[in-house]
Image (tube, rainbow, N blue to C red):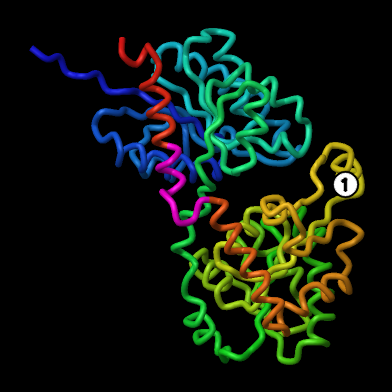
C-alpha cells in the first residue's frame, strides 16, 4: 500500500505592496508547478489574497514608509515579527520565504534562526548591500539558507560570504507584456505620429515630488526651446496625484497627466524619450525600449550620508548591469535644468543617439531575464528544488 505524500507547506511573508506583488506572482507560479502537492500560508496583501492566501495579518500593519509614519507603528511591527516567528514554530512549514522589506523580514529571519535553526529560511529579493553597508551580507548568511537574487551580479557577491544564492531574473520582466498601446494613446490624446513626446517621471513619493518635479519642470522649459512642438506626458499614482497636479501648474508645454497603470505603460511606448527619477520605473522604461535620462535629488543631509555609504560608481540599474554610462545619470547638484536638457535633447532629435541607447536597453532586458523562463517560475523552481533536497522533506 502506497501512503499519500504529505503536501509541502510553504510560508510566504510580504510586508509591503511591492513584496505583495512579487508574492502574488510567486504563488501563481508555485501553484502552476506543484498543484495540490503544496500548501501556502503566510502574510500578504491584495495580490496574494487574490491567489488564495488567507493572510495572518493585514499588510497595513507593516506597510509604512518614512520616519513620521514608521515611529508610531514600531510596537505593531515588532509584535508582528514575533507573531510570525511563533506561527512558523507552531506550523513547521517546509520553508519560510521572506519577500523584500528587509527592515521587517530580516528581523523575522534572525528571530527564527535563534528559536529554531532547523526551519529553512529563504530571502526573495536581496537588499542592495553590495552598494552600501556590505557587512550586512555576513549577517544575512547566518540568518538565511537561500537567497533568490534579481540581478545577475548578486550571486557572486553573496556567495563569497557563504550565502547560497540563485539568480532568478527580475520580476519586472513579467510586466513586459503590458508595454503596449503607444500609438493608440497618441491617437486618443490627439498627438500625431511625428509629434515629439517626452515622458516625465518624477517619482511616486511625496519627497520625490518635492525635490525632483520642480527641476524636471524647469528642464522641460529648456528642452522646449530646443525641440519645437514638444508635448509632455506625466504618469503618476493616486496617492501623490494631487501634489503632482499642483506642482505642474504653469507647465511650459502641452501636458497630459496620466493616472491609470495601463496608460502609464502606453505612455512609455508613446514617448520618444523619458526623463525619470531613479527607481524601478527605469527598469520598466528599459523593457519598453524608451530612451531615457535618469536623475535624482534628495535633501542635503540624506545626500551626504548616501555619499558615505554608497560604494558603486553608477546609480541607475541600467548602468550597473552594463558597467558603463549607457544612460545619462545626473544626481543632486548635477541635476540642473540645463544639464538635463543637454542630456535628453539628442534622444528627441537624433535618431542614431536614440537607436544606440535602445540597443543598450535590449542588452539590459536580456540580462534581467527577458526571453527565458519567467522570473517568478524560476524562483518557484528554486524554492521547490531547495526544499525537496533537504532531508526533512523526505521524512
Query: Relative to residue 96, is residue 349 drawn left or right?
Result: right
- Work out which quarter of the rendered image holds the N terminus and state it: top left
Relative to 92, is 55 above or below? below
User: Which quarter of the picture shows residue 308?
Assistant: top right
For the point 51% across and 48% down, which residue is it?
Answer: 171
Give the crowd class for mark 1: few <14, some 14-19, many >=20 residues within 10 Å: some
Which one is in front, 252 or 332?
332
Is residue 165 found inside the magenta-colored segment of the image? Answer: no
In-front residue for pair 99/260:
99
Q: Looking at the picture, how far across and down is residue 154, in whole percent?
A: 63, 37
Stretch in magenta: 369-379
Q: Is residue 212 left or right of residue 76?
A: right
Image quarter (top left, top right, bottom left or bottom right) of the C terminus: top left
Q: Position of residue 177 (x, y in %)?
A: 44, 63
**Quarter-of-image position of residue 158:** top right
> Nearest the camera: 189 or 313?
313
User: Relative to 234, is 44 above or below?
Assistant: above
Residue found at x 54% / y 48%: 170
Residue at mark 1: 303
Amino acid at each position: 500500500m502506497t501512503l499519500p505524500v504529505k503536501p509541502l507547506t510553504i510560508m510566504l511573508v510580504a510586508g509591503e505592496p511591492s513584496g505583495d506583488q512579487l508574492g502574488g506572482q510567486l504563488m501563481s507560479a508555485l501553484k502552476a508547478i506543484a498543484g495540490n502537492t503544496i500548501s501556502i500560508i503566510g502574510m500578504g496583501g491584495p495580490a496574494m489574497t487574490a491567489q488564495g492566501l488567507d493572510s495572518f495579518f493585514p499588510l497595513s500593519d507593516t506597510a509604512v514608509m518614512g520616519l513620521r509614519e514608521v515611529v508610531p507603528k514600531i510596537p505593531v511591527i515588532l509584535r508582528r515579527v514575533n507573531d510570525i516567528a511563533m506561527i512558523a514554530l507552531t506550523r513547521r512549514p517546509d520553508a519560510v520565504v521572506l519577500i523584500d522589506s528587509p527592515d521587517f523580514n530580516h528581523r523575522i529571519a534572525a528571530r527564527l534562526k535563534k528559536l529554531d535553526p532547523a526551519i529553512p529560511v529563504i530571502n526573495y529579493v536581496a537588499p542592495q548591500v553590495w552598494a552600501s553597508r556590505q557587512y550586512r551580507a555576513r549577517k544575512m548568511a547566518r540568518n538565511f539558507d537561500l537567497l533568490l537574487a534579481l540581478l545577475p551580479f548578486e550571486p557572486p557577491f553573496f556567495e563569497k560570504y557563504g550565502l547560497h544564492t540563485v539568480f532568478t531574473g527580475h520580476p519586472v520582466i513579467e510586466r513586459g507584456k503590458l508595454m503596449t498601446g503607444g500609438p493608440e494613446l497618441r491617437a486618443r490624446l490627439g498627438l500625431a505620429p511625428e509629434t515629439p513626446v517626452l515622458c516625465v517621471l518624477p517619482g511616486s513619493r511625496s519627497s520625490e515630488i518635492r525635490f525632483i518635479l520642480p527641476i524636471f519642470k524647469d528642464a522641460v522649459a529648456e528642452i522646449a526651446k530646443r525641440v519645437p512642438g514638444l508635448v509632455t506626458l506625466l504618469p503618476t499614482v493616486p496617492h501623490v496625484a494631487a501634489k503632482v497636479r499642483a506642482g505642474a501648474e504653469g507647465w511650459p508645454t502641452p501636458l497630459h497627466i496620466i493616472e491609470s497603470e495601463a496608460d502609464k505603460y502606453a505612455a512609455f511606448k508613446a514617448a520618444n524619450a523619458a526623463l525619470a527619477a531613479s527607481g524601478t520605473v527605469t527598469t520598466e522604461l528599459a523593457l519598453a525600449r524608451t530612451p531615457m535620462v535618469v536623475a535624482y535629488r534628495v535633501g542635503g543631509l540624506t545626500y551626504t550620508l548616501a555619499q558615505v555609504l554608497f560604494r558603486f560608481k553608477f546609480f541607475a540599474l541600467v548602468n550597473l548591469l552594463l558597467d558603463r554610462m549607457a544612460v545619462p545619470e545626473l544626481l543632486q547638484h548635477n541635476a540642473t535644468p540645463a544639464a538635463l536638457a543637454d542630456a535628453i535633447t539628442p534622444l528627441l532629435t537624433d535618431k542614431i543617439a536614440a537607436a544606440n541607447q535602445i540597443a543598450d536597453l535590449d542588452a539590459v532586458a536580456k540580462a534581467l531575464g527577458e526571453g527565458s523562463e519567467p522570473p517568478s517560475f524560476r524562483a518557484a523552481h528554486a524554492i521547490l528544488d531547495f526544499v525537496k533536497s533537504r532531508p526533512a522533506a523526505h521524512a
